[in-house]
Image (tube, grey):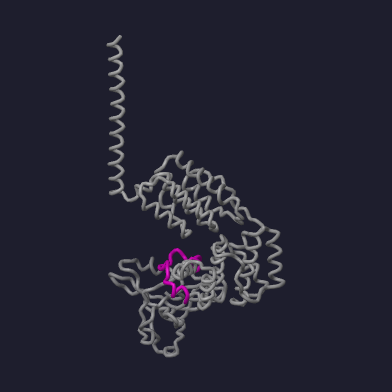
């Protein structure tokens, strides 16, 4: 009996010792692996559920007006997380305090954490929402935020979104009146044109059909003759769409005047909306997106500098559509030696523009120096001729009408020379200009 007990005790102690040794080995490997990954893999510490939850929490809080209670709750949540690096906790603290996002779209949680962990993250967000946000007077929960979360995580989020309260409807209507005031006072639009001009705005989509009909009718009967800001707070979810709509109308509604950009910047300053550089980048991006919608796929130039886009918008007529753009232009005229040249084809004419860089506090001197009008045949009144070269393909353009006083009656008139890129086929690069020419 004693031998049996002794043998059993030895086996149990041996089993416990083996378990302890394996546990110790596992801990050592985990510690070494964790430290090595932290040193050699910079994003390793972001591949775990607590970090993902913290990043998603900052993204959620960014979409709602902040309060002392919500801010305190968010900071407490971050303080309780077990993170792999304390610098990450400080970063999340700063994001919440500044109402910024930690950029959860950069961390691909679906690849690095399990489905159960992702579901836990969703439940924790729902719990935070219910405890601190749901009972507040939130007028609208953005559908885009919820959809983006579900796309990243691969799990559903049980939060009601897209709820347009009566308060939100009133604010949206107020924003629409402000946009109409911009059109009437700045663009000199007619009240009968307001429904069409406002139909593409984001703000209009937030108003239900009944209120939309009443608002549009009121705009036509009593149009606002001055531009006034809507009664919304700097942190209101509507502000992003209101500013984007204001920029869209500034760019898309004829006539375009670059001086109106000051009105946009003043509105952004009033609402403390981003910095001047961010606003300028936003305007430039929306401007080119609008201009390039009708640009033909074969156009050699797919993008323009901001000052060139502004010049084109100011020169193109109301019903003209931009079709193609050429750069790399040579012309022997001393008056425009220092200017940037741009050949633009529209639905009714081809223009040669001489552009000046947009200098601070100075209105740029941009002018159309040559044009070729579209004939009834659908072709344009100019001649395109190939210049053969082994390295660069070139095309000479003659005819058309010179608009510079000094060379209107020159004999012979100057020739416009377009240079292609190195080792590019003439027929491919100059296809649009060749197909447009009356004489080839």
Magenta range: 289-311
* Residue 300 covered by magenta stretch: yes
Nearer to us in this view, 180 or 271: 271
Q: Quadrant of residue 115?
A: top left
Quarter that holds the C terminus: bottom left
Q: Is residue 22 left or right of residue 255?
A: left
The spot of residue 348 in percent (x, y) is 52, 75
* Residue 211 covered by magenta stretch: no
Res. 370 in view: yes
Q: Residue furthest front?
A: 2
Quarter that holds the N terminus: top left
Nearer to us in this view, 383 or 114: 114
Is 314 above or below relative to 195?
below
Nearer to us in this view, 310 or 79: 79
For the point 44% across and 52% down, the residue is 105
Q: Quadrant of residue 353?
A: bottom left
For the point 38% across and 52% down, the residue is 88
């Amino acid at each position: 009996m004693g031998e049996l007990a002794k043998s059993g005790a030895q086996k149990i102690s041996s089993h416990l010792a083996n378990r302890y040794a394996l546990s110790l080995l596992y801990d050592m490997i985990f510690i070494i692996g964790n430290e090595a990954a932290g040193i050699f893999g910079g994003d390793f510490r972001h591949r775990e559920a607590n970090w993902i939850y913290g990043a998603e929490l900052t993204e959620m809080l960014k979409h709602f007006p902040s309060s002392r209670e919500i801010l305190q709750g968010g900071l407490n949540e971050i303080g309780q997380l077990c993170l792999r690096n304390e610098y990450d906790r400080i970063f999340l603290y700063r994001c919440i305090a500044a109402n910024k996002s930690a950029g959860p779209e950069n961390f691909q949680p679906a690849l690095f954490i399990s489905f159960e962990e992702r579901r836990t993250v969703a439940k924790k967000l729902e719990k935070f929402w219910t405890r601190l946000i749901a009972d507040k007077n939130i007028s609208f929960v953005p559908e885009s935020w919820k959809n983006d979360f579900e796309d990243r995580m691969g799990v559903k989020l049980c939060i009601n979104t897209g709820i347009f309260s009566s308060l939100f409807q009133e604010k949206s209507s107020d924003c629409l009146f402000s946009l109409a005031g911009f059109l009437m006072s700045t663009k000199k639009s007619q009240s009968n044109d307001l429904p069409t001009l406002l139909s593409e705005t984001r703000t209009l989509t937030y108003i239900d059909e009944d209120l939309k009909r009443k608002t549009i009718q009121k705009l036509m009967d009593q149009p606002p003759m001055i531009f006034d800001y809507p009664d919304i707070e700097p942190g209101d979810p509507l502000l992003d769409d209101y500013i984007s709509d204001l920029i869209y109308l500034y760019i898309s509604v004829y006539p375009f005047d670059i001086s109106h950009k000051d009105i946009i910047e003043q509105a952004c300053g009033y609402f403390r909306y981003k910095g001047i550089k961010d606003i300028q980048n936003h305007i430039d991006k929306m401007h080119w997106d609008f201009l390039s919608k009708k640009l033909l796929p074969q156009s050699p130039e797919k993008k323009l500098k901001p000052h060139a886009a502004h010049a084109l918008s100011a020169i193109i007529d109301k019903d003209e559509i931009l079709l193609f753009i050429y750069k790399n232009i040579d012309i022997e005229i001393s008056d425009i030696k220092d200017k940037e040249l741009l050949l633009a084809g529209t639905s009714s004419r081809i223009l040669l523009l001489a552009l000046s860089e947009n200098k601070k506090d100075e209105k740029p001197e941009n002018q159309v120096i040559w044009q070729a009008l579209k004939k009834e045949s659908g072709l344009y009144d100019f001649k395109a001729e190939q210049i053969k070269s082994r390295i660069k393909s070139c095309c000479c353009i003659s005819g058309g009408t010179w608009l510079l006083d000094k060379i209107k009656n020159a004999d012979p008139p100057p020739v416009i020379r377009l240079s292609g890129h190195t080792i590019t086929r003439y027929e491919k690069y100059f296809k649009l200009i060749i197909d447009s020419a009356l004489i080839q």
